[in-house]
Image (cartoon, rainbow, N blue to C red):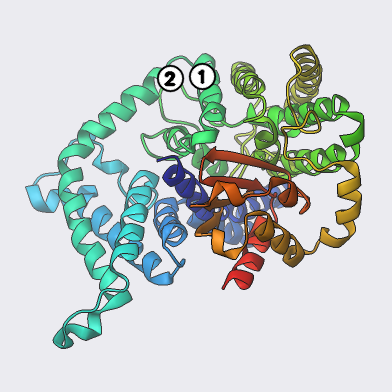
Amino acid sequence: MKAKLQRLGKAIMQPVAILPVAAILVGIANLLVKALGDGNIVSVFLSTAGTAVLGNLGILFAIGIAYGLSKDSNGAASLSALVGFLIVTTMLKPEGIEMFRGTAPVVEEGFGAIGNGNVFIGIIIGILAANAYNKFYQVKLPDALAFFSGRRLVPIITAGLSLIVTIVLYFLWPFIYKGLVIFGSSIAKLGAVGAGIYGFGNRLLIPTGLHHALNSVFWFDLIGINDIGNFWAGQAATFPGVTTGMYQAGFFPIMMFGLPGAALAMYKTADPDKKTVAKSLLISAAFASFFTGVTEPLEFSFMFLAPGLYLLHAVLTGISVFIAAAMKWIAGFSFSAGLVDYILSFAMPTANKPYMLLVQGVVFFIIYYFLFKFLIVKFNLMTPGRGDSMAMPTVSEADDNKATVKNDDAKKAEIIIEGLGGVENIKTFDYCSTRLRVEDLDPEKINEAKIKQAQVIGITRPGPTNIQIIIGTSVQFVFDAMQRIIG
């Protein structure tokens, strides 16, 4: 189950990676509106293009997840997902329900939330299409039907399964929608406190990948909150108790300042003979967090080594989100809470005193730095650069290998394959935004010391036959190099 959740998390990164494009387009459009006034053709052109992406997130999630979960990332899986998504949403949107019943559905049933932007249905259909592809893409039909064999069969199978999903959702969707509304409303009614609870849950669920489900309630238009969509559209929230941007703003002080403060604390407390390596790894991870909001390289560097610190990180995130929401210091993001989205936020009419998030960020930098430093030393926590249990080569090993593996993905791939026990010991392998995931290994053949020579950020062992190698945002290129070697 953990492996499946991890693969789903990786697949979800496909559509999520598109969101910065929409943010840049809408952000530039709003900058032009401020500079040139309403109605200029360039801002209208860019804004329309950006909202075209944000308004069709359900389709993007269905296609991206099917692509990411299919065995060979084939376009037939994505086409099947599109077919399934269109069937379900067309039949279950209010116009479709009205055709079946002869009367329009009542608002409380929630069918009005079904459309191209429904991420929940996009995720379901994406998973459905991927599984249909993986099971049927090599099926051979009798000669009379041979044209529909293999990959051509998958969209047909998916269409049939989508009809079943449609029937099931017709009866279940009102209850699902009501449950989500109750959950979202119970959090939203708590105002800033609810935002803080959400921020805590968001970070706490990162290791499981289930944070995406929680995000879909508050960030997207699943129950009507649609915090991201409303922010970039410049619209006020219509959900009771919600202020546009309140579920986003508090992440900026954490990702831009808090986590870099934690990185500095981990460097300061690293063993003397490992400081050089710790410095290079932590600086790159901190910069990714600050500039882009990609926090996995940094979070996974201590998540499993010092889980107590990660729990503290989740608590501090909740506090930050609470403070920003309570003070109504608002900024938003489409990808993550890094510098790029922060700058784009200034152009949005829904932003409010975003500069105060910088002040809050400085405070959290200090809090993270001193708390992490104190706890690491007090309890002798095994953070990067400390002890023998971390995935960290010694200075001499790093110096010997740095020149040969830096910016050489093929060399890194060779070293990793050798450290994993050779090609014959690798049954399946995949990657997400920062990690290489390898499964079905003989653990006796794994040589972690060898893997460390590839200058990786970290190594985790979620199971006896599974290993995760944290490489960073360049993981795709190492994965591609491994594919070329393994064939």
Choose the circle earlier in sequence order: 1 or 2. 2
409, above or below 193, in the image = below
Depth order, front residue of 188/446: 446
Identity of the residue drawn at 74% across and 41% down: 339
The amino acid type, in three-letter code, at marker 2 is Ile
Report helix, strand or loop for mark 2: helix
The amino acid type, in three-letter code, at marker 1 is Ile
218, above or below 77, in the image = above
Mark 2 Cα within 10 Å, few/some/many (few <14, many 20+)? Answer: many
Identity of the residue drawn at 16% across and 83% down: 142
Asked if residue 432 shows in the view, the reply is: no
| Residue 446 point in image, percent of width and height | 63, 50
Left or right, 366 with respect to 94, comes to right
Are the residues flagged by discs 1 and 2 in contact, CB closer than 8 Å? yes
Q: Indicate the quadrant where residue 350 lies.
A: top right
Which residue is denoted by mark 1 in the rendering? 197
Asked if residue 137 shows in the view, the reply is: yes
The label on residue 187 is 2
| Residue 415 point in image, percent of width and height | 73, 59
Which quadrant does the N terminus fall into? top left
Depth order, front residue of 395/19: 395
Q: Indicate the quadrant where residue 329 lies.
A: top right
Identity of the residue drawn at 81% across and 59% down: 405
Q: Nearer the viewer, mark 1 or mark 2?
A: 1
Left or right, 251 with respect to 233, comes to right
